[in-house]
Amino acid sequence: MPAARQSELIISVWPKMSPSLRGAAREYLLGQTAVATALLGAVKNGPLTPADIDPESEQFLRTHRDADIRQQAESALVRPESANRVAIVTEYLRTMPEQGDAAVGRELFSKRCSQCHKLNEIGHAVGPDLMALTDKSVAAIVTAVLDPNRAVEAKFLQFGAQTSTGQVHTGILTNETATSVTLLAAEAKAATVLRNDIEELWSINKSLMPEGLEKELTPVDLANLVAFIRSHVPLPTRKSFPGNQPQRVAANADGVFVLTPATSEIYGSTIVLEEKYGNLGWWSSADDFVTWTLDVPTSGRYRIDIDYACEAHAAGHRLVASTRGGSLTYKVDATDGWDDYRTKSIGEIDLPSGVQVLTLKPASRPLPALMDLKEVRLVPLR
């Protein structure tokens, strides 16, 4: 089959492909430059949208061996965030109490979450396994609850199936054979439909978890729910290195927070504190992250400056900086090698008064590395 015809066919069926079929075909199909180029062109110019590209395929394209494909992916796969969702998450993080009541949270989990999640022997295992969460921070859990479609694994996307009699089933596609497909809905209700009876099968491109839970959960409720979840999942173990002594950081005389790896808490599989420059290095795993605890005297807006190095072949991954006041994402630019440190302003963030935690992490697994980081400065904007 000619490459152009093959690409045209793949584009027409891509939105309807199941997660397992996409996974099986991903390396073969997207590894072909012509197919990858055509698919990205269809995302940028229609008829596809970024929502049609699952996170695993997006990662494959963003880290493609072909530099032109990587550049096209950067341009085409821009997922516009819902300003409303971002604002809601930010407001909840700002107004939630520091500590929640896990006992009250248990009741909320049973009432609001147990239809699709199982934790501490409560609920149904339909959605993601909460015990296996990579990021168990308060901000990450709040974001997942209030903005469930920000990042969804392909295997947890909803599918719809309409039968020849007009009946519609929706749910996560958990099993497919040559003769049938099985959709799993809330409360672990499974519907197995014979392929001969299916008139149409399509991806809904949204999580099974609904948006709008802020209508049912106050900031206090969510703090209690987060407390329950965090009390029953394994939290990451802090790594220890010579010269690393985590401590609460106060602003200097100019109101600037100067943050170094020496005062941070370091977590993850591969990240280390390197001796040569006193930097964070080997930042190569999805679960690698670093935090600083800040003593913020008054609420305000700050510019984030980083002193970092990054070789060209590693550049382009996304760094996420977050506090209870919000978050920002920065695409890491290249410097002239791992020994060439430069200072870069990466954006602005709000810091509420009181004890706050700044977290830096990669948006996804950053192979070969996110960057080497020597220092972070939070500069007050007057």
Image (cartoon, rainbow, N blue to C red):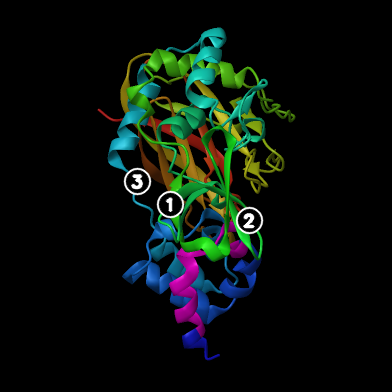
- Residue 153 appears left or right of 277: left
x, y percent for residue 292: 54, 26
- Residue 326 appears left or right of 172: left
Question: Considering the numbered disc 1 on the image, is that residue within a helix, a strand or a loop?
Answer: loop
Q: What stretch is highlighted in magenta?
A: 6-22
- Res 56 quadrant in image: bottom right
x, y percent for residue 34: 51, 81
Q: Which residue is drawn at 37% across and 30% down?
A: 89
Question: Considering the numbered disc 3 on the image, is that residue within a helix, a strand or a loop?
Answer: loop
Amino acid under label 2? Leu
Q: Kindly identify which residue carries mark 2.
A: 367
Q: Which of marks 1 and 2 is nearer the N terminus?
A: 1
x, y percent for residue 317: 52, 54
Q: Which residue lies furthest to the front in this view?
A: 165
Q: In which quarter of the image is the C terminus?
A: top left
Q: Which of marks 1 and 3 is nearer the N terminus?
A: 3
Q: Residue at x 46, y 68 (%)?
A: 71
Amino acid under label 1? Gln
- Res 181 quadrant in image: bottom right
Q: Quadrant of the N terminus?
A: bottom right
x, y percent for residue 339: 61, 53
The alpha-carbon separation of the residues under discs 1 and 2 comes to: 45 Å
